Amino acid sequence: MALISKADLGFTDYNWTIFRGDDPRVSGAPDETVFNGSEGHEVLYLINKMAKINNFKQKFSGLKVERMLREVLPPEVQTQIDIIHWIGKNWTSYK
């Protein structure tokens, strides 16, 4: 079960493009797929993958991931896997 749903997101200005269920932008394991932070489905996918990887149980952790993606993710960190590593490395330094 997903930790965060569309209704839970803190930002509301996402695009909601429809993707095939097997599209690597929103399915499978995080990989070298380039992340688009303005796509709501991609944001939800990444938040919920982070929650699963890190065993997050509370929504505020997922919302922290969303804020990190929006507010502090460096532009040179672009792929799903690099973003997951970057968030893990910077988790404690961001409130």
Image (tube, rainbow, N blue to C red):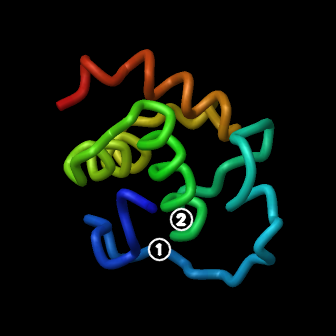
The 10 Å Cα crowd at callout 2, few under 14, some 14 to 19, many 20 or more, is some
Q: Quadrant of residue 93?
A: top left
Determine the residue positioned at 36% across, 51% down. 66
At label 1, the amino acid type is Tyr
Q: Quadrant of residue 21?
A: bottom right
Determine the residue positioned at 55% across, 31% down. 84
Q: Nearer the viewer, residue 4 or 43?
A: 4
Which quadrant of the rendered structure holds the N terminus? bottom left
Disc 2 secondary structure class? loop
Q: Nearer the viewer, residue 75 or 30?
A: 30
Residue 28 is left or right of residue 58, and the answer is right
Q: Residue 5: horizontal and vertical position, in percent?
A: 39, 70
- Find out whether the residues at labels 1 and 2 contact each other: C-beta distance under 8 Å: yes
Q: Residue 74: horizontal and vertical position, in percent?
A: 50, 32
> Which residue lies under the disc numbered 2?
38
Closer to the N terminus: mark 1 or mark 2?
1
Disc 1 secondary structure class? loop
Residue 67 is left or right of residue 53, and the answer is left
Outermost residue on the front side: it is 1
**Relative height, residue 64 to residue 26 (above, below):** above
As drawn, the label of residue 14 is 1
Determine the residue positioned at 42% across, 43% down. 51
Which quadrant of the rendered structure holds the C terminus? top left
At label 2, the amino acid type is Ser
**Relative height, residue 24 to residue 54 (above, below):** below
